Image (cartoon, rainbow, N blue to C red):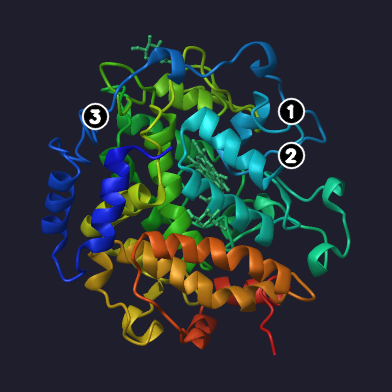
């Protein structure tokens, strides 16, 4: 399913020594992959002029079995607008509980997500928020009350209940948990600010999103005393949440093969109706717009592609790689030194090289996982057996340096992390 150019990018990434400075690296990748247009620049990022547009295979059906059906009271919907929309249109089970394979197939069919990325995200969800097979795109549900499966200690919480395991702070439209008491609903002030940024040009691109990410990151520092930028939810999932808005929601066309995202499409995917100034948010009513075209076949959004987008955002804004948080009051953000945290495998400067940013997030996750699972599973053998290969596949494909231990006690100074352990989800293994 991978296009030739993506296979090239992946190969080139794996081969390039990490000592090359990033701009140089980017140039090499473009040349080797035959990419001559700037990869990331606004207004319409175009990875590769050869990305084709085929209306027949890219039009996403919103009729018949894929007609929009609003969720009922027992249907699960949560923090992810993409998954909510898929469930509303019958690309995932309407009840909002799906298997790993259903997530992989659905995200490919509707959005053109690379199977490498969807496999990692879906398996991660099944282990941290589900029962190793299925998970809920919203909160806990009796459908997953399969006590004992895989040694589960309690009812899986779904991605709505996965704060700092999956769902994190500084999200585009979702509020921080400890600021608003929930982190799965859209906050209108955040949506309105995002909307306003692009409305003059009716264009929402990666540069605009990156600028708003800077604002949101600072807002979390300023307003959330328990802000915690965790390895997975902060370093891996957070950049994804931001880049997905453009990479997946943008409407593809022959004029804009990599997509152009307008305000009306953004509103539809975010369950917003009404006119500017009097927007109405109906939670769970995310819709795939009529006449909307997904990514081209062969132009799937893969892990190496996400790694590139992540590091581009990082180059201009190094705070994004800062694992750490507020230490007991607003405006007390302390970032851990990556050198101390990883015993010197990564350092602040090297995080901006090659795939190191994504490697850093994934490798820390591998090291932390047994501890994190101890609060969820009686016996974590099955869970580890599922998750570690998925994480190692990802680090392998990115050519990551290997990290064999992490100085973990360092997280304890952050109340955002300590709170998780206190509520039983992050109990330390003894
Ligand atoms: C199996 C695949 C997926 C999983 C497990 C997943 C999971 C999540 C989770 C846990 C969040 C919350 C992260 C946070 O706190 O910011 C999130 C947010 C988000 N997801 Fe997904 N997602 C998946 C696929 C998709 C797809 C296909 C799209 C396509 C549009 C998408 C778009 C987004 C966006 C835009 C956000 C940020 C929401 C906001 O705060 O405005 N996701 N997703
Ligand atoms: C997507 O782009 C095509 C071509 O410009 C256009 O006909 C279609 O209406 C657009 N779809 C949406 C939902 O904006
Ligand atoms: C790991 O990668 C291999 C080769 O691409 C693939 O066949 C396998 O399904 C992947 N496993 C996981 C758990 O991602």
Quadrant of residue 63 within the rendered picture? top right
Secondary element at tag 1: loop
- Of labels 1 and 3, the one closer to you: 3
Q: Position of residue 36 (x, y in %)?
A: 12, 37
- Residue 44's disc is 3
Mark 2 residue crowding within 10 angstroms, few (<14) / some (14–19) / many (20+): many
Disc 1: which residue: 71
Quadrant of residue 37 within the rendered picture? top left
Evaluate whether residue 175 shows in this view: no
Image marks 3 and 2: residues in contact by CB distance under 8 Å: no
Precedes in sequence: disc 2 or disc 1: 1
Is 77 situated above or below 277?
below
Q: Position of residue 207 (x, y in %)?
A: 26, 41
How far is mark 2 from mark 1, CA to CA? 8 Å
Precedes in sequence: disc 1 or disc 3: 3
332 vs 350, left or right, is: right
Disc 2: which residue: 76
At x 49% / y 66%, what residue is drawn? Answer: 392
Evaluate whether residue 77 shows in this view: yes
Question: Does the closest atom of ligand 1 sit within 8 Å of the Cβ of label 1?
Answer: no
Secondary element at tag 3: loop
At x 47% / y 39%, what residue is drawn? Answer: 113
Q: Position of residue 59 (x, y in %)?
A: 47, 16
């Amino acid at each position: 399913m991978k296009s030739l150019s993506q296979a090239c990018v992946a190969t080139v990434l794996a081969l390039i020594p990490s000592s090359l400075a990033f701009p140089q690296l980017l140039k090499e990748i473009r040349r080797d992959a035959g990419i001559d247009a700037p990869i990331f620049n606004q207004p319409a990022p175009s990875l590769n002029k050869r990305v084709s547009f085929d209306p027949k295979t890219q039009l996403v059906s919103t009729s018949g079995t894929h007609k929009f059906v609003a969720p009922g009271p027992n249907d699960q919907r949560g923090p992810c607008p993409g998954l909510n929309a898929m469930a509303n249109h019958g690309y995932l089970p309407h009840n909002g509980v799906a298997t790993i394979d259903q997530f992989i197939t659905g995200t490919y069919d509707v959005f053109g997500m690379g199977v490498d990325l969807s496999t990692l995200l879906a398996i991660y969800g099944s282990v941290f928020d589900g029962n190793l097979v299925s998970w809920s795109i919203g909160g806990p549900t009796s459908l997953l009350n399969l006590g004992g499966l895989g040694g589960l200690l309690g009812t899986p919480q779904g991605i709505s209940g996965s704060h700092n395991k999956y769902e994190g702070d500084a999200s585009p439209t979702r509020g921080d948990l400890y600021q608003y008491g929930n982190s799965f609903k859209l906050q209108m002030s955040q949506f309105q600010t995002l909307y306003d940024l692009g409305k003059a040009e009716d264009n929402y691109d990666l540069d605009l999103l990156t600028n708003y990410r800077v604002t949101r990151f600072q807002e979390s520092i300023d307003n959330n005393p328990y802000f915690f930028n965790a390895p997975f939810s902060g370093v891996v999932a957070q950049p994804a949440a931001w880049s997905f808005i453009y990479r997946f929601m943008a409407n593809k066309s022959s004029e804009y093969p990599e997509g152009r995202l307008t305000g009306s499409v953004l509103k539809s995917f975010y369950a917003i109706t009404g006119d500017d100034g009097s927007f109405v948010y109906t939670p769970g009513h995310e819709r795939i717009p009529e006449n909307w075209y997904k990514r081209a076949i062969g132009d799937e959004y893969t892990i190496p592609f996400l790694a590139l987008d992540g590091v581009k955002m990082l180059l201009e804004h190094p705070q994004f790689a800062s694992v750490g948080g507020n230490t007991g009051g607003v405006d007390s953000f302390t970032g851990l030194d990556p050198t101390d945290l990883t015993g010197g495998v990564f350092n602040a400067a090297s995080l901006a090289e090659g795939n190191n940013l994504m490697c850093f997030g994934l490798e820390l996750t591998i090291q932390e996982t047994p501890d994190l699972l101890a609060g969820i599973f009686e016996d974590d053998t099955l869970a580890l057996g599922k998750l570690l290969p998925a994480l190692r596949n990802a680090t392998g494909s990115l050519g990551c340096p290997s990290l064999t231990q992490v100085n973990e006690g360092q997280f304890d100074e952050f109340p955002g992390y300590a709170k998780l352990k206190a509520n039983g989800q992050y109990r330390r293994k003894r």
